[in-house]
Amino acid sequence: MKAKAAVAWEPRKPLVIEEVEVEGPKEGEVLLKVHASGVCHTDAFTLSGDDPEGAFPCILGHEGGCEVVEVGPGVTSLSVGDHVIPLYIPECGHCEYCRSTKTNLCQTIAGTLWSGYMPDHTRRFKVGGQEIYHYMGCSTFSEYTVVPEIALARINKAAPLDKVCLLGCGITTGIGAVLNTAKVEPGSTVAVFGLGGIGLSVIQGAVMAKASRIIAVDINPDKFEMARALGATDCVNPKELSVSTTEAIKEMTDGGVDYSFECIGNVEIMREALECCHMGWGVSTIIGVAGAGQEIHTRPFQLVTGRRWQGTAFGGVKGRSQLPGYVDRYMNGEIKIDEMVTHTMPLEDINRAFDLMHEGKSIRSVIIF
Ligand code: NAD
Ligand code: AHE
Ligand code: ZN
Ligand code: ZN
């Protein structure tokens, strides 16, 4: 079938709206109508050319709110008309990662998914005969996309797809990082570096975990209003400090926070986030994604003296079994999404969503198809 899609032909160039040929679903695959898609910083990261796994030309997008329009042979758990969220971390349910309660990193189709192919090593998109790469197994910047059954979470049909699409990445990642990965306890002190869709969702998670103090850090003070509205108790702009952010936070918290989260993708800030943690027990969780060749550094002394450094992907959430519950928690008012959607636009305006992100003017833009 034909579909309108935003194609990233090469790094650092605006996306181009093209008429794409979308091949129907093969064994174990599902054809989706995309109703809405969020734009995450990771899409911009890959478009920047810094992503070692970035393959071009591709169709970006991984925060989709979708409807099943056709199922391929062998698909048993989904039917036409179901509402689904595509998962960049699938859940096959039987690999050793899925069987473990310690991780959500299902590996059954990871090799093809992260290199831009469907599980059978072929692709479903073409423009004028040229094959186009998939992206994170989702490619939601297209009216229609094809996703493996094991990478789809079926959700409550009453949920608005133009909001719950953000549970496909940003909001789930932030909340999950706090509740699943760090397991923040009531009364804890928390520092959040970077107040985009991810950092603000960490704040939501920290409120749910009943943190006593939530210190929000950003160099863009326009982000503070939303951070406070979501529950941040203190806002810090590193540009206004006379000491390092690490020192300022240690001073504010009598030696450091219990938990910190890096939600930027800046390896220097990852170090600050670790080093502002309390000696003996502080835990820092890296969420931000950094470019090829970037490495994290600290003095081993920081770890020897009891700080711990860890990371998280999709907030540790196992998508097929746990994401529907996040949708239900949005529906009953426990998870806030509407506030995060600062801009909506048609696919034709998608490059404006990237501009708004880079200018620090949006939290999340949602593309409405
Ligand atoms: P965003 O662009 O919306 O927000 C980033 C925020 O960081 C902005 O508010 C910006 O002002 C702030 N910032 C930039 N430099 C800063 C600095 N030096 N000090 C303090 N604040 C600074 O991005 P987002 O969509 O929220 O994504 C954040 C990061 O998380 C990205 O690296 C993204 O790729 C990554 N991410 C990771 C996962 C995962 O599963 N691990 C999931 C989603 C996103
Ligand atoms: N391609 C990058 C890695 C990107 C990355 O870490 N992606 C996160 C999701 S970001 C969503 O916005 C992830 O889940 N990774 C799991 C995995 O298996 O890659 C690089 O550096 O190579
Ligand atoms: Zn994302
Ligand atoms: Zn698995």
Image (spheres, rainbow, N blue to C red):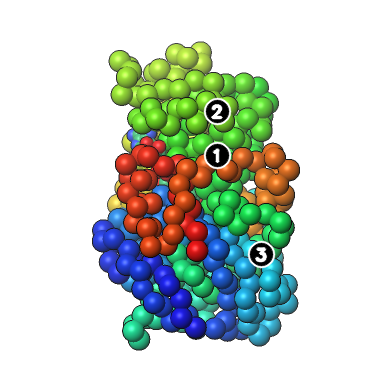
Q: Residue at x 65, y 41 (%)?
A: 335
Q: Is residue 45 visible?
A: no
Q: Residues within 10 Å of mark 1 (few under 14, many from 20)?
A: few
Q: Residue at x 37, y 24 (%)?
A: 237
Q: Which residue is mark 3?
A: 83
Asked if disc 1 and disc 2 are in contact, CB closer than 8 Å, the reply is: yes
Q: Amino acid at mark 1?
A: Glu
Q: Amino acid at mark 3?
A: His
Closer to us: 124 or 52: 124
Q: Is residue 108 visible?
A: yes
Give the image location of residue 123, x and y in percent: 45, 79
Q: Which residue is mark 2?
A: 229
Q: Is residue 218 above or below residue 330?
A: above
Q: Amino acid at mark 2?
A: Ala
Q: Quadrant of residue 77?
A: bottom right
Q: Residue at x 44, y 20 (%)?
A: 249
Give the image location of residue 43, x and y in percent: 40, 56
Asked if disc 3 and disc 2 are in contact, CB closer than 8 Å, the reply is: no
Q: Residue at x 62, y 68 (%)?
A: 67
Asked if disc 1 and disc 3 are in contact, CB closer than 8 Å, the reply is: no
Dot 2: element: helix
Label whose residue precedes the other's in the sequence (1 or 2): 2
Label whose residue precedes the other's in the sequence (3 or 2): 3
Closer to us: 232 or 215: 232
Label whose residue precedes the other's in the sequence (1 or 3): 3
Cα distance in 3D space between marks 3 and 2: 31 Å
Q: Which residue is mark 1?
A: 339
Q: Residues within 10 Å of mark 2 (few under 14, many from 20)?
A: few
Label 3 CB less than 8 angstroms from ligand 3: no
